[in-house]
Amino acid sequence: MIKNYLEQLRIQRWDDHRYYHHSRINQSLHFISALSFLFAYVWLFIDPVVSALVGWLVSMTSRQAGHFFFEPHTYDHVNQATHEYKEEIKVGYNLQRKVVLMAIWALSPLVLVADPTLFGLFTPWASATDFMRQVAKIWLVVGGGGLLFRTVHLFFIRDVETGLVWMTKILTDPFHDLMLYRSAPLALMRGELMDPGLHLNPEHTLGLIGEPTLEEQHA
């Protein structure tokens, strides 16, 4: 069971890379995101409020900007797939779902403007610092809720293992992305806008070459 779990994790990671990370700008932003997420992970045990602010304002915005603004949305010749097909088979949050999640994040501070006590949970904020700390607490809930919602959703539309593997992937992405995209900024400075190695299928990343991907298994 553990071997199969790790194999599915490798497959999800490889599919995520080959389908959704062609742009060197996107990869570089993921490298920055990974660094800031690791900082946020450490600060979660020191001051969760600071962790939430860094996680959302730096890590998530840089990460999603890469997908929305720099990743090609045209036909994927490497994988012979349309953008629409990739959106349909995405295990985690595709662009449409990300729009909803990011909208919830961006609009959530308005709740404190409308009700400074948040239905009696908070002491009314009296300064900008108080306001930001309370917003950060809401963002912690939004982040955790978004992770748990999609995990449980996958339990029903796929299976429990797929959901748990995806959650593991998301939580460990900062470590994996740091290693995977560490050379992307240098490649970008050399003028390389697209990753030329996406056609490669390294055994240490995917597992058994020739095996169907997780998306292809459930397409």
Image: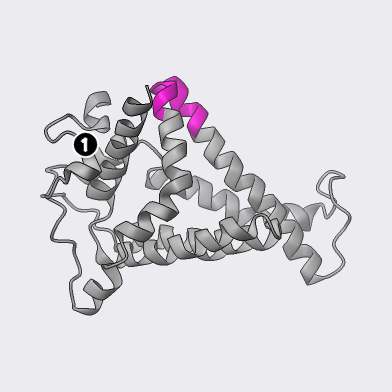
Q: Quadrant of residue 39?
A: bottom right
- Picture mark count: 1
User: In the image, 66: left or right of 49?
Assistant: left
Does the segment drawn in magenta span residue 159? yes
Residue drawn where x is 71% and y is 53% of the image: 137
Question: What is the x, y in percent for residue 1?
Answer: 37, 21
Question: What is the x, y in percent for residue 61?
Answer: 48, 62
Question: What is the x, y in percent for residue 91?
Answer: 36, 35
Q: Which residue is mark 1?
A: 207
The one of 100 and 131 positioned closer to us in this rendering: 131
Res. 26 visible in picture: yes
Residue drawn where x is 22% and y is 40% of the image: 206
Element type at mark 1: loop
Question: What is the x, y in percent for residue 116?
Answer: 83, 55
Residue drawn where x is 32% and y is 63% of the image: 26
User: In the image, 138: left or right of 83?
Assistant: right
Does the segment drawn in magenta span residue 56? no
User: In the image, 134: left or right of 168?
Assistant: right
Q: Quadrant of residue 41?
A: bottom right
Q: Could you tell me what secondary structure mostly forms the magenta stretch?
A: helix
User: Coloured how?
Assistant: one colour
Res. 68 visible in picture: no
Location of residue 98 with respect to 134 vertically, above or below: above
Location of residue 3 with respect to 121 vertically, above or below: above
Callout 1 amino acid: Gly
For the C terminus, the quadrant is: top left
Q: Which residues are magenta?
A: 151-162
Residue drawn where x is 31% and y is 43% of the image: 13
User: In the image, 173: left or right of 79?
Assistant: right
